[in-house]
Amino acid sequence: MAVADQHSNIADQRSKIKAAKQALLRFLPKRARFGLNASRARYLRVYEPELRLVGPLCDRRLGSIDVGAMNGHFTFFMEWTSAWVAAFEPHPILFRQLCGAFGPTVKVMPYAISDRSGTTPLMLPHWEGKDQLGCATLEAQAPAHFEPRTITVETRTIDELDLGKIGFMKISAEGHELAILRGARAKILSDRPNMIVALQNRLKPGLREDAIAWLAGLDYDGFFIRNMTGASTGQFSIRTFHPDRTLHPVRDFVPDLQRPEHALQPDGSQRGEYVWKFVFVHRSRPEVIDRLGRRMSRWFHSPGAPAVSPEYCFIFFMVGFVP
């Protein structure tokens, strides 16, 4: 059999397996589906290792905020490790999917968080005739390969909302993160929450440097995790991703770690390492850094070690145990 035919047969088999998995998922309750998907993202999709740090960054006595909740992965683990969670997702399709997926301590709201309240266009990029749900943005300029359309959404600032004391905040808003931080300045100063913030210069030039400098002015230190070690970017596979066990300071960040051509593509492919989420901890809380170090040494597998299987994640969820 020709090599091309072998590759075609393998692709067909994988497609059938994926379709079978999707069919099985439809029989699960909504909350179970979200839990399973979040567990798979946490344990298998190690190109986003920050999911594993939600526990040590949250405070069980305090609330957490998820700005740009999207698929609910971060919200799911915040729910387990926070007193309450406020999740914000302005995309109408994603908002409807998130409603009813969590327990009573999670409140999902359809606001676009920004530095001012009112209404504004939300850009919904298209690619090959489909909405790219995770790429909706308030920024005027979408990536060039998308065909955008817009809807009008309500905007709010974190500071104007009647939220309790928080211990953790995650922000991912496709280039709008600095505006969200500015609209949460009073909350950040009063509560000094730990944060995970997505910062991509390919979406807004200079965003990463500007946001890091802005948070440094509020006495925050920034860190990042390399999500691929010892792998070549020539023949790249998502399974070659292995996060290291080091929390690197942002001063060690180099532009090669965020090359636009290595970003996750709309078709799910990725050619190399791409670091886009950053951890921020207030300088008055060195104990948080110690907790992060202990968690990383416990959960992050070394290059070459097998990842946790989907079945193992499924068992974890079904018995109600999330480590």
Image (tube, grey):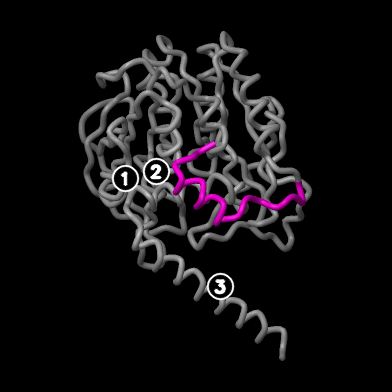
Q: What secondary structure is marked by label 2? A: loop
Mark 3–mark 1 distance (CA, rounded to whole Å)? 28 Å
Closer to the camera: disc 3 or disc 1?
A: 1
Work out whether 90 lies above or below 217. Answer: below
Residue topped by disc 2 = 72
Which amino acid type is marked by label 1? Ala
Residue shown at the point (48%, 24%) measured from the top left: 58
Q: Nearer the viewer, residue 179 or 93?
A: 93
Work out whether 85 lies above or below 48. Answer: above
Q: Is residue 322 left or right of residue 2?
A: left
For marks 3 and 1, the one nearer the N-term is 3
Point out the stretch of residues depicted in magenta.
303-323
Q: What secondary structure is marked by label 1? A: loop
* Residue 320 on the magenta segment: yes
Q: Is residue 86 left or right of residue 217?
A: left
Residue shown at the point (45%, 51%) measured from the top left: 36
Residue topped by disc 1 = 101
For marks 3 and 2, the one nearer the N-term is 3
Q: What secondary structure is marked by label 3? A: helix
Residue shown at the point (21%, 30%) measured from the top left: 118
Position of residue 198 measured from the top left corner of the image (x, y, whole percent)? 50, 36
Residue topped by disc 3 = 14
Position of residue 104 measured from the top left corner of the image (x, y, whole percent)? 27, 33
Which amino acid type is marked by label 2? Gly
Quadrant of the rendered image containing residue 69: top left
Mark 2–mark 1 distance (CA, rounded to whole Å)? 9 Å
For marks 2 and 1, the one nearer the N-term is 2
In which quadrant of the rendered image does the C terminus lie?
top right
Callouts 2 and 1 close, C-beta under 8 Å: yes
Count every numbered label the image shows and give the total.
Answer: 3
Which amino acid type is marked by label 3? Arg
